Image: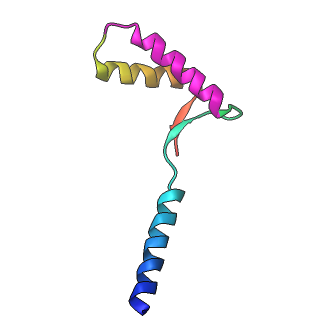
Amino acid sequence: MKKIIIGALTVSTLLLSACSTSQPMWRKAGITPHDVNNTLAKCRYDVGLAKVNQNEKAEMIQDCMMAQGFRYTY
């Protein structure tokens, strides 16, 4: 009986800690998540027009967001 309770508590703790882990995302003070998504979509579209490889595109998208004052943080 004790093993079942301890097992259930362990599983519950792991599930709760997994839910509370924050993921990195683009942030800027005073900007809503909707506006962040719009800006990111615009950067992706603009960079998508460039004739460069995938690695360069990812870097260009990052540069585009940072140029507009966004930072990729937790």
Which residue is at a point 38% across and 23% down the rendered structure image? Answer: 59
Residue at 57%, 27% in the rendered image: 37
Asked whether residue 68 appears in the rendered view, the answer is no
Residue nearest the observer in this picture, 7 or 34: 7
- For the N terminus, the image quarter is bottom left
Taking the image as shown, residue 73 lies to the left or right of residue 35, namely left
User: In the image, is residue 37 part of the stretch drawn in magenta?
Assistant: yes
Question: Where does residue 2 sit, x and y in percent of width and height?
Answer: 43, 92
- Please check the rendered image and state whether residue 18 is part of the magenta-colored stretch, yes or no: no
Which residue: 58% across, 21% down? 39
Colouring of the image: rainbow
Q: State whether residue 57 is above or below residue 74.
A: above
Q: Is residue 69 left or right of residue 62?
A: right
In the image shown, does 1 or 16 lie closer to the viewer?
Answer: 1
> Is residue 25 depicted above or below 64 in this figure?
below
The answer to which image quadrant residue 27 occupies is top right
Q: Residue 74: where, in percent of width, then height?
A: 52, 46
User: Would you say residue 13 is visible in this rendering?
Assistant: yes
Farthest residue toward the left? 53
Residue 8 falls in which quadrant of the image? bottom left
Q: Is residue 74 above or below residue 19?
A: above
Q: Which contiguous range is marked in magenta? A: 33-51
Residue at the spot 49% in from the left edge and 46% down from the top edge: 23
Q: Main secondary structure of the magenta part?
A: helix
